[in-house]
Amino acid sequence: MPTTTADDTGRTTEVRDAPSAATSLVVCSLEEWGTVRRRLRILVDELVARDPSLEVLYVAPAVDVPFELSKGRTDALRRPRTEQVHPRIHVLRPRKWLPRSLGPAADRSLGRQVSSAAAALGLVDPLVWVNDASYARWALGTSWPTLYDVTDDWLLAPLAPRQEARLRADDDLLLAHSGAVVVCSPDLARTRGRHRTVDLIPNGVDVTLFRTPQPRPDDLPPSPVAVYVGTLHEERLDVDLLAALAAARPDLSVALVGPDSLGPEASARLAALDTVHLLGPRPYDRVPAYLQHADVVVIPHLVNPFTESLDPIKAYECLAAGRPTVATPVAGFRELGPPVVVADADRFVDAVSDALAADPAGDPPPEVASWGERADALAAVMRRVRAGGGAS
């Protein structure tokens, strides 16, 4: 017979009988579940496709209720708290009622919501895959095996002192007590592997998707056009370099495809450039069309400690699409050969011009690692953690 459980708000939920699945997974993610597919979302899809017994609770970033109300926004509050997005994948969007600055009560509340949702789905002894380090104390306080997956070194981003201290404490806890630590870049392997063994599992690409021809997107400006695909973030995107490119090549349209996470000043500066087009996010299965129809793909990234910690997914996508690409010398691109050209900021505009003038015919696209290969490697680490093997 089903029973009921209550979360910290008093809401009751019917608990299903335990599923027959041999494995279950709780993913505490820094990434929203949506049409923009990033590393964790892609790997979850791959793992579920490979294991017909796997049940997943995907914990998306919490909805900050007081903040949303203060801004007069109610759309996020109207979204379901728990949503089934696949027969074996449920997405939880916890409600955050208190600021973390008030102490650990906010984290405890979020943890209780995750525990309640896992119980409601009948997940038995799930493995906890932690990408959002704020769930450190909750995850390690359960009796469940835990894997820590570090995809960005936010300790290198500008944070308020209290935020940095809290993140560092959570990171230290997970490094010390998780059954395994997975990182996506060599730099993260260096920093997180100082005192324990870590598993390096880089990013990948859906090779078939990015190499299957697609029609030209209706909103892509006419040729010549340079395309950038990715989240617009001030720790990554060199706005000055984009402005210099627009000034030097007024004949070239620049299409920026991805969510805009820039501050108001940087967003306004780009929007004021006549040849720069902020197209916004696009569904993952439409991204290849923008790359395939670019005259040149541009990666105008800042070179700093934060970008050094990354393994950019777009590097794999550029290789798979096979279009001429010009990138600043950031991690993930420096080691690549054709069709990628690496140029310092002071040579970037000239390198873009050279790429536009070059004969587009060239070598066939190189071999590139698939997300399936990465999912197989991650599944092996998860089996080891479940078996209590810890670090290899």
Image (spheres, grey):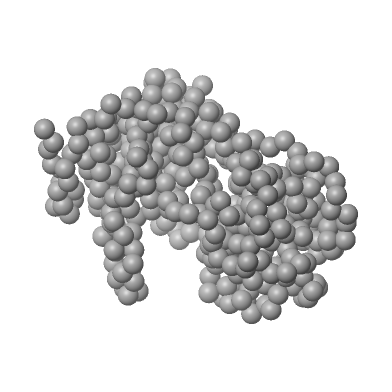
At horizontal 83% and vertical 42% (from top left) the residue drawn is 363
Does residue 322 sit above or below 222 in this rendering? above
Q: Nearer the viewer, residue 83 or 57?
A: 83
The quadrant the N terminus occupies is top left
- In percent of width and height, residue 355 lies at 83, 57
At horizontal 32% and vertical 75% (from top left) the residue drawn is 72
Q: Is residue 352 left or right of residue 185?
A: right
Q: Nearer the viewer, residue 136 or 49?
A: 49
Does residue 273 sit above or below 299 in this rendering? below
Does residue 332 sit above or below 325 in this rendering? above
Can residue 295 be seen at all in this image of the molecule? yes
Q: Is residue 379 left or right of residue 238?
A: left
Image quadrant in which you'd find residue 160: bottom left
At horizontal 63% and vertical 62% (from top left) the residue drawn is 217
- In percent of width and height, residue 330 lies at 70, 50
Q: Nearer the viewer, residue 27 or 121?
A: 121
How many numbered circles are shown?
0
Image quadrant in which you'd find residue 282: bottom right
Can residue 342 be seen at all in this image of the molecule? no
Q: Is residue 298 left or right of residue 166?
A: right
Does residue 143 sit above or below 212 in this rendering? above
At horizontal 44% and vertical 22% (from top left) the residue drawn is 384
- In percent of width and height, residue 17 lies at 19, 32
Q: Is residue 102 left or right of residue 172?
A: left
- In percent of width and height, residue 113 lies at 25, 47
Q: Nearer the viewer, residue 173 or 378?
A: 378
